[in-house]
Image (spheres, rainbow, N blue to C red):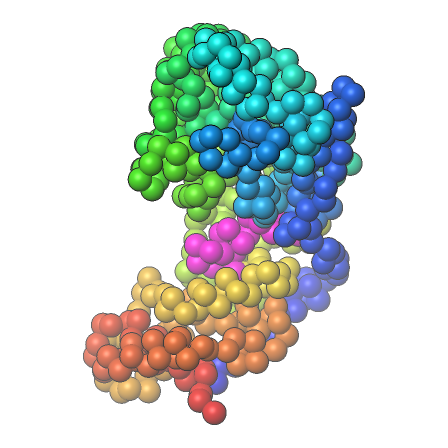
Amino acid sequence: MMKTRIFLLTLALGFGLAVRAEAQVSGGHDTVVVQSGTLKLKALLWRPRGRGPFPAVLFNHGSGHTSGTSAGGPDRRHPELLGPVFARHGYVFLYLYRRGDGLSAGQGNASGDLMDRAFAAKGQEARNEIQLRLLQTDEMDDALAGLAFLRGLPEVDSSRVAVVGHSFGGSLTVFVAEHYSALRAIVTFGAAGYNWDRSPQLRARLTEAVGRISVPAFFIHAENDHSLGAGISLVAEMERLGKPHRIRIYPPVGRTVDEGHDFIHLRISTWEPDVFAFLDEHMRKAGGANEEYDLFFYSLKERLAIDDWTLTLGGLDEGFKEFFTRDDLQKLARFSGEIEPLVLASLREGSIKATLVAAYLRYRSALPILRKNLLKLREPYSWEGPDYRLEEDYISDDQYPYNSTYIEAIEAISGMPLRKVVHLTPGERLMLKKRAKRAKPNSADQKSHCAKWLLAKFPER
């Protein structure tokens, strides 16, 4: 059985680690009221772990209907999918139901209903006209009210706010950025996807708007969206004017244009790394209300991105002393809640540095990720196994530094031996047994030997 190392860096380094608050709202949300003129709009609010102040995001949904559905099907409203993702990445997230829509039914008329009525009465031109008017008046008023509400929250750094929008809400997001220059960034999913080819007025007005905005913009489409025109054309205009921008057209989603247009909800794991890399780049730059945190966040992010397997050779204690200075440790303790999403994201990539941080800060949220990493049977960069002739030489902890470090971290965080924390399912045990059967002396099959080594940590009862 592996010898458990005592993980007491705080005592060894001569200062106490502040107790980290365990309150977490990132999995749940609050329902709040946003005043927009005389209307009382409902919104859902997610908060990340920690003390803040945090960067924040306002989400603009697409056009909607009071009934929640139209001839084309149900309105796409999935705040329960998006809110926890943004909170997990360290962002306060406000999902505002604009007038007449969803939870704000009864507060004014929903944009989709108004456009449908105009189309039924006078055709496409009438629909185009009212759509453009709504985007620059009533819907804009609601979005700006949402921004004001968000920036006024005590846990929000008002200098670090972005807007994300989908479909009609993507077009609205561009107009909000034109109107409100203090934003740090905008991201649009399928902006004007349905209407770009149908409304010359909207095309012209959006092109004019991107010429006036000053914030970095990220335009996202799935290849089978209704139209890619908005992203391609608007980015071309921003390129011509030398404005900061990015575009990403992802592979098709599903089989229909409606599924492609709903990429934001159907493929969260696909866009998540790109969107948060973009937001982090522009939302966590120094110069805001929390410059010290911003600088530390970016330094930590860069350091976690470059892994170093040699940090595993001396165990957690030695690895941590080599990787972090006393000042680093103080900031880790101070910002433990705020940096948790970053550390967990790096941990999912198997980062040893993130493993050290998670163990030091006792992130219980890291336990399921460490368990998963352990069962991947990760191979080291350098392995002496093929040089050995005796079977027992392959079952040494020193041969598996990554996995040994994962085990140490699990035991340090939980305060218990591995076998009391990680319980193999029958399927996992069978997988390890099958792989371990391939382990032979003088074999270069590292994963098979690792499976045999790991099985020894979980003897059958």
Which of the two residues, 407 or 238, is positioned nearer the viewer here?
238
Query: Which percent across, then down, holds residue 176?
Result: 59, 18
Residue 134 highlighted magenta (yes or no): no
Residue 335, placed above or below residue 380: above
- Most extreme residue toward the bottom is 461
Q: Position of residue 121 (x, y in %)?
A: 51, 12
Vertical comparison of 276 with 388: above or below: above
Residue at image point 43% right, 43% down: 266
- x, y percentage for residue 212? 53, 10
Q: Is residue 56 visible?
A: no
* Position of residue 241 measured from the top left corner of the image (x, y, whole percent): 43, 10
Q: Is residue 199 left or right of residue 186?
A: left
Main SS category, magenta section: helix
Quadrant of res 230:
top left
Q: Is residue 347 magenta?
A: yes
Residue that appears at 50% across and 65% down: 370
Counting labels gives 0
Q: Nearer the viewer, residue 67 or 13?
A: 67
Q: Residue furthest front?
A: 121
Looking at the image, residue 32 sits to the left or right of residue 63; the answer is: right
Q: Residue at x 71, y 34 (%)?
A: 42
Magenta stretch bounds? 335-355
Residue sitting nearer the eye, 213 or 7: 213
Residue 271 visible in the snapshot: yes
Q: Residue at x 35, y 79 (%)?
A: 430
For residue 312, above or below residue 300? below
